[in-house]
Image (cartoon, rainbow, N blue to C red):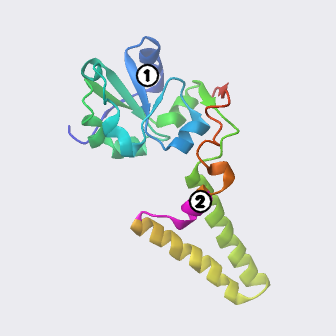
Amino acid sequence: MPGTLREIDAITAKSWLDQGKARLFDIREADEFHREHIAGAHLAPRAEISQTNAGSDSAETTIAIFHCNSGQRTREAASEIQSCGYLEAYALEGGLAAWKTAGLATELNRKAPISLQRQVQITAGSMVVIGILLAWLVAPWFALLSAFVGAGLIFAGVSNTCALARILALLPYNRRGNTGAAKLSPKTVTG
């Protein structure tokens, strides 16, 4: 059925990968991938999924497994994934979270910053709480800080742009090349 992918559980996916039957593609963003990923996974951010088989003579004979963190983004990208030209394309059921729940190893780089999305959530949430506390303890007009953050989040959702994410991306630890992915050997963890 167009727009949907067959799902594969983590244990079966691991077996296929170990046997060389399939290739694994991680459709999360680069910052998420550099922080933690499944060994052997190829980074293919959702915006670049259509290029995952570019230059590959084996695309028509290869089984491809795509995953994100929970499976939601993979389900949303099903149409793009199906247009990649792989003989068979699957979604990893439950994504990276299910992989870890199954007790399978990931490569974790604790020196890489947490994802930009999580940084935005932490910063925005902190600003809302600070605004409320200051409005309660100091002066009511501090509630405007919380209102400003709320308006910014609404604008980010409507426009698909986030000024806070752009600002956070400029911080030294978020700059490309400082993720440590190329310089550090990630630690393998389970669960």
Quarter holding the N terminus?
top left
SS state under label 2: helix
Q: Is residue 154 above or below residue 103?
A: below
Q: Is residue 149 left or right of residue 81?
A: right
**Element type at mark 1:** helix
Residue that mark 1 sits on: 13
Magenta stretch, main secondary structure class: helix
Disc 2 to disc 1: CB gap under 8 Å: no
Amino acid type assigned to the residue bearing label 2 in the image: Val
Tell me what residue is drawn at x 47 percent, y 20 percent: 14
Could you tell me residue 88's position as x and y percent?
Answer: 28, 25
Answer above or below: position of 54 versus 145: above
Q: Is residue 148 visible?
A: yes
Position of 77 with respect to 44 (left or right) is left
Asked where in the image residue 105 lies, by quadrant, the reply is top right
The residue tagged 2 is 120
Q: Position of residue 3 (x, y in %)?
A: 25, 42
Which span is picked out in magenta?
160-168
